[in-house]
Image (cartoon, rainbow, N blue to C red):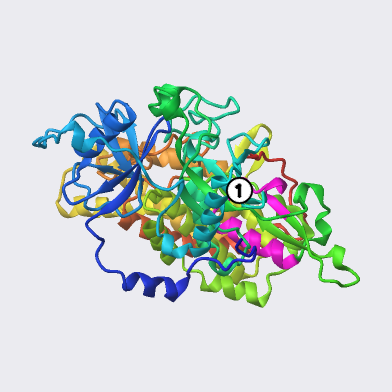
Amino acid sequence: MAAAALKGPLSGSDYLNNKSTEGNQAVRRRVFVQTETGCVLGIELDGSENVHTVKKKLQLSLHVPTEETSLMCGDTVLKNDLSTVRNHSPLLLTRNCLHRSSSTPCLSPSATDLYQKDQSCPIEVIGCSSHFPVTKQLVNDIVEAMKIGIDPIPVRGGLGGAYFFRGINGENVAIIKPTDEEPFAPNNPKGFVGKALGQPGLKHSVRVGETGFREVAAYLLDYDGFANVPLTALVKVTHPIFNVNNDAVNGNNGHQQREQINKIASFQQFIPHDCDASDHGTSSFPVSAVHRIGILDIRILNIDRHAGNLLVRKLDDGGVNRFNRVDLVPIDHGLCLPESLEDPYFEWIHWPQASIPFSEDELQYIANLDPFHDSEMLRVELPMIHEACLRVLVLCTIFLKEAASFGLCLAQVGDMMSREFQGHAEEPSKLELICIEARSLLQISDMTVNYSSENEDEFQFDLEYETLNGDLSRISEDTVSFQKNPCEKYGNISMNYLSKLAETGETKSKSSINATSLGNKISNEQLPMSSSFVTLADMNEEEWLAFLENFQNLLHPAFENYKLGKVGQRLTQRFGTSCKF
């Protein structure tokens, strides 16, 4: 079995150099198609394959209806051409996303040609498996164990389905979590069902069936094992132990087919440990371990870092104080990288270690982070990831880099990202307020540009012009006031600024400005905005870059104001919620 201490995925120039040496993709590719109800089929694509033939194969092989369905890869709805689909990509077949195509239909191959039985190995790594050599070894150990009758066992705890897969000596090698057995997913074994894959899940900004690729993203972003995230990959796995709530769901129409069930799942190396952080005193946790996990949590906006997903390993080095030394291993990152800013849950925020300043090594690590490189890497490795998730990654990494360079400690950074309750109302975090201000400046810029353009064309506005001119003067005064004293501005921001944004939006609708109102460009594919004060996905690329510029310009005044306001104060105790999977 592979050693427990693993080096993280390729990083920095090594990753880019490896990618630059890759040629064009081979004509033959393998993809993994999953339906909303959890049915999975691995399909070999050649140059003649298209969406029509893939649907036919699904219909014939799995007995699932494909009329009025769409084939998707992340945010992209695949039309008919599949040439852009990368090798080992997971695809999702969804219902009623598009009307029937009006393009010229393809000639349908015969049913004999299209019928396909998936004859892959029991566990198949999805994605760039060359980056996971240790995963292959773990997979081989598990397959050999299954051949001699050592089967996986279900995990009793948590809300979703999870299984320990074992090695030839009966030891736990990996924990596998099928995407269609997540909370609310169709085949959840613990009664938490009711939604199709792709719908809003336990957290509104994380869709059902998508926690698996987030687990992989956390591992890929943990360069050189900085935070100690265990090796994690996305796999297609076949075994009869998996749960199916209705045989018809997976196209299983008989006992023989029910024996082998295909699933797409996250695969994480099992790390032997003594307990989790909820069963151990936090005073003995190393400062560096807490800092490194916290740095990762901030980058990926982990909205569920509770004590139960921090494993504790006691280190025995033969010394006198051997039982006082421990190591922390972070697991369960399925609720990171949400599609919009959410209220994070950081268990470590009130630990004394989080209030100790970052070390020089930690500051250097943070300074070297490149969120745009990270985003591009995830686009390549996880083509199903949503652009909204990547924008959250970029925003939070920039926030961390600027906060660390300003001199804030881990606890202060986490506090600025966390919301507070005033009475029964939840107020935006400091981070969200900065984003709201950055959006408002973007809106003011749009209004000014449109006003200037209309003025050059010498349109006659009459009364409308007088109203618009007055509103722009008022907004300009607010902007000048903010530029003169940004710290004071941040002292009074909070929910009042949300009302101001709404008021500004009303003024725009009454005037003849052609700028698009905030929030009106959200596509049908974006999640509902129930608990989000800030949306990032509705901006085009130009707006996004302008927003980031505004965001960065506002950070240092906000940090200064935060430090002034926190002098002599302790961090507010938070009683947030977490979700133990």
Q: Please, what secondary structure does the residue beneath circle 1 have?
A: loop
Residue type highlighted by circle 1: Asp
Q: Is residue 165 left or right of residue 574?
A: left
Q: Position of residue 231 (x, y in %)?
A: 56, 58
Magenta residues, as a range? 287-311
Q: Identify the image quadrant of the C terminus.
A: top right
315 and 110: which one is in front? 110
4 and 553: which one is in front? 4
Q: Residue at x 54, y 58 (%)?
A: 219
Magenta segment: does it hold 54? no
Q: Is residue 14 left or right of residue 170?
A: left
The answer to whether residue 474 of the structure is visible from this angle is: no
Q: Identify the image quadrant of the N terminus.
A: bottom right
In the rendered view, would you say 179 is above or below 63? below
- Image quarter of residue 355: bottom right
Q: Position of residue 180 (x, y in %)?
A: 48, 35
Which residue bears the numbered disc 1? 332
Q: Residues within 10 Å of mark 1 (few under 14, many from 20)?
A: many
Magenta segment: does it hold 296? yes
